[in-house]
Each structure stands twice: as structure tokens, then as C-alpha cells.
Amino acid sequence: PFMGKEEFEPRKYVVGARSRADNVYETIRSINDGRYLFIKNFRPHLPYMQEAHIFETSKKEGFVEIHRLHKEGQLNAEFARYFKPKPVEEFYDMQEDPWEVNNLINAPEHQEKINELRSALKKWMTEETKDGGLLHEPEFMIRSKGSTVYEMLNNPEKFNAKAIYEAADRVGKASPEEVIEMLKHEDSGVRYWGVIAAQSFEELTSTIMTDLESLLNDESPAVQIEAAYTLLTMGENKDALNVLAKYLQDEREWLRLHAARSVELIDEKAKPILSIIKKVQAEGESLEKVKKENNENKSMYWGATNMSLQYAIKNCDKQYELPFE
């Protein structure tokens, strides 16, 4: 309360989160006690600044300059980190290092505080709040059908927070054997993080590749899409491309966005389904125009989906001009 006479107990910790922004998927959580900051990167193989319109548009002059300097190799070491994979964990002394550039995660003298904050963050995510970010957005939307996301997250039969946290926590640390176990887990949330963990490997074993191919028929659409994207980053795969084409045309907006972002990121490998991408983009744009003319609410997902579809078209047709540049 910030008005009146009601008193309150000051928080011991403050928790921060970074999740999806427009068409960019991310999962980062932080916790600090006023001086020390602990950060957990659940997708460490991705850079802080992913390839996306929100970081690249020519209308944002700051980003234009950042990308110019990056291309010319003139960014300082601290800023160059934005374009590189992230550490699995980060720890900063905000009093001595207010710019948070010296990651002390391995400093022996800070291990007690690091363990304290790490444990507090895990408890916050798995017990105190039942953090929905442990599930991929399409997954928690599907699981909460007929109810609410809040109710679903607090139903242990629908959301095993601790099991899914343990899987997410292994990304960037898991062995191939652990990943194989995760890919075969009974909980689709664990299988999803198994796929993400596989993405952090430079090369995939034949067993993991086979398991990913089997996940193209998984009961979870989110797992299917992520497995398809992962396989396509490794090479051509017609079955994986068909999965993405299928969900591009799905009526569930959150699934369409997931598929669109995946199609954008596989670049020219999407050429065989270019006609479908163009069709989905044109139909979606027409529908949003009609909604606007009728003063109906526009889709909160369409703008993000349209970004990815437009970039996917550009990736496959270099003559195509992006309308929002």
C-alpha cells in the first residue's frame, strides 16, 4: 500500500522476469536483496539481443548504430556480450559494480550468498507463485482451456512446477544422456525443456535426433513445433517443415505465433512452404483490417505474428520489401 495508514513488511527479495516480447521468446528470472543480484538464464544459448524486428528496425536509431558498431567490430567488450550466448547464471555486487559487468558467479567468497538467492528464486518460482513461465506460452494456454492460467498453475495434476523447474534448470548443463531422459518424460513441460536443452549442444547425437523426430508427433503442439525448429536448424527435414506449416494455419493464435517465429528463424529453409506463409500473412492482415473497420479489438498476437511472417517472406524472397522498415 502506498496510501493510508496501513503498514506492511518490507520485502526481503525483489524478483524480476523477462519473458516473451512481441515475437521474441525468452525466459530469464532474477532475484536481489538490495545489494546482490542473482540471474538465472533458462535459455543461455540465446544472446541477450536476439535477431528480431524490435532490436533491428531502422526507426530506432540507437539500434541502428549498435548494429553498425557490432558489424564493424567496434563495440566494447561489455556491450559485445549482448550478441553472444549468456551464462547459465549471473551474480553481481550492485554496490561495488553498479553497471553489473563483473559476473561473480564462480567467486568462492560469494557462494553462500549465491546459494541463498538461488534457493530463494527456486522457491519463489515453484512454491510461492507457481511461475507460469516454466511452461511455454502455447503450453500453458492449452493446459488452462476451460479454466484460467492461474487456476491451472495451482492444480498439481496439471502443473508439476518442481519437475518442470528441474528440467529447465538443466539447460546449458545437461549431458546428452540427461537430455534423452527429458525428451521421453511423461510431462510435456519436461519434454519441452529437453528440446531446449538439446538446442544448447553444438552437435546432436543420433539418438537425440531420432527422439526429436518422434516428438514431431507429440501430444503437445508446443513440443512438436520446438522439435521441428530444432531439427531444421540441423538440416533439411520435410516432416519438420510440415509441422510448422500445419501450425501456421492453426486458429489458436499463440500456436500460430510460435510457428511463425520458428519459420522466421530457419531462414531460407522455409522456401518450400513460402506459399503457405504468404497465404497466412495475407489472410491475417485482411482479418485485422476488417476488425479495425468494425471497431473490434485487434489480436494481441497478430502484430507479433505478422512481424515473423514478413521476415520469413523476406528470408525466402530477397526482392520482397518489408512494409514496416
Image (cartoon, rainbow, N blue to C red):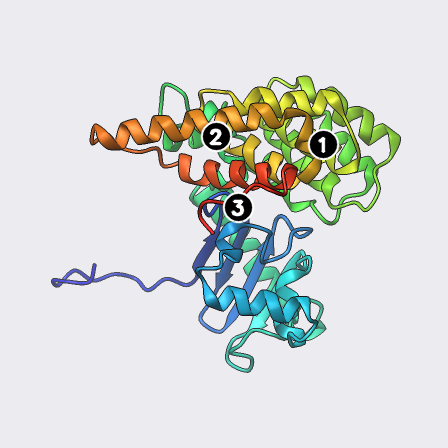
Q: Nearer the viewer, residue 321 or 52?
A: 321
Residue marked by disc 3: 24
Quadrant of the image containing the N terminus: bottom left
Helix, strand or loop at label 1? It is: helix
Against 240, residue 58 (above or below) is below
Residue type at numbered disc 1: Met
Residue sitting at the far front: 319
Residue marked by disc 2: 281
Q: Nearer the viewer, residue 191 or 303?
A: 303
Sequence order check, earlier mark of 1 and 3: 3
Residue 128 position in % (x across, y down): 43, 45
Residue marked by disc 1: 182
- The answer to whether mark 3 and mark 2 are in CB contact below 8 A is no
What whole-number distance in Å separates the C-alpha atoms at marks 2 and 1?
Answer: 35 Å
Residue 124 located left or right of residue 186: left
Q: Is residue 124 visible?
A: yes
Residue 249 position in % (x across, y down): 51, 21
